[in-house]
Image: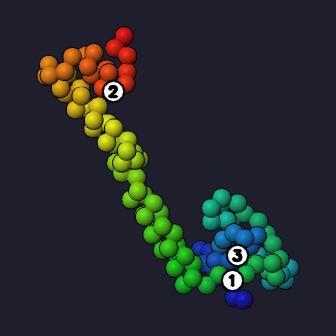
Amino acid sequence: MSFYDASGENPMVVQYNSDIWVVEGVNSTARQVLLRNVRSDEVCSVCIDSVKAVDHHALIQSSVAKVAAKTVWRSLILVNGFTPEQIMDAQSRCNIIVRTLSRKFTVQEAASECDLSNF
C-alpha cells in the first residue's frame, strides 16, 4: 500500500479500528504510520499492517449517500426544527390570539379553545 503525506494534494485515507483516519506520516523502518482521526482529531501511531486502505471513490459515494439520507430526514422536519403537527398547533393558537385581540373571542373562550386556564 502506498501512502501520501497529508500535507500533499491527495492524503491517504485508511480504515483503522472501524473508523476513518488520514495518514499524516510514515516510518518505513519501523513499519508505523501516524494517523489522525477525521472525526475526533485524535492522533496515533500504529503498525502499517493494522490499517486498510479506503477506496476514495467508495468514500465519496458513502458521503453522498449519507448527505442524501440527512436531507431526506431534514425534509420531515420543517421550519426551525418543528414538526408539521407543532406548526399546525402554533398556527391554530395564533388564530385564536388574533381573534381574541380583535374582540371576536373572549379571553375565557380563547383559554378554553387552547385547553388552558384563564387565571
Going by the numbered disc 3, the residue's amino acid type is: Gln
* Quarter of the image that includes the N terminus: bottom right
Q: Which residue is at a point 27% across and 22% down the rendered structure image?
A: 110
Q: Which residue is at a point 81% across and 72% down the rendered structure image?
A: 46
Going by the numbered disc 1, the residue's amino acid type is: Ala
* Quarter of the image that includes the C terminus: top left
Secondary structure category for the residue under label 3: strand
Query: x%, y% of residue 52?
Result: 73, 81
Residue 19, quarter of picture: bottom right
Residue 6, quarter of picture: bottom right
Q: Which of 113 and 48 is in front in this view?
A: 113
Query: x%, y% of residue 84?
Result: 36, 48
Mark 2 packing: few (<14 Cα in 10 Å), some, or many (20+)?
Answer: some
Q: Indicate whether 33 appears above or below 42.
A: below
Going by the numbered disc 2, the residue's amino acid type is: Cys
Q: Mark 2 points at which residue?
A: 114
Q: Which of 98 and 115 is in front in this view?
A: 115
Query: x%, y% of residue 41?
Result: 65, 60
Q: Mark 1 points at which residue?
A: 53
In the displayed image of the protein, which residue is found farthest to the top?
119
Confirm or deny contact between disc 1 and disc 3 (CB under 8 A).
yes
Q: Name the residue under label 3.
A: 15
Q: Which residue is at a point 60% across and 78% down the rendered structure image?
A: 11
Confirm or deny contact between disc 1 and disc 2 (CB under 8 A).
no
First of labels 1, 3 by sequence position = 3
First of labels 2, 3 by sequence position = 3
Secondary structure category for the residue under label 2: loop
Q: Is residue 5 visible?
A: no
Q: Disc 2 versus disc 3: distance between alpha carbons?
A: 55 Å
> Nearer the observer, disc 1 or disc 2?
2
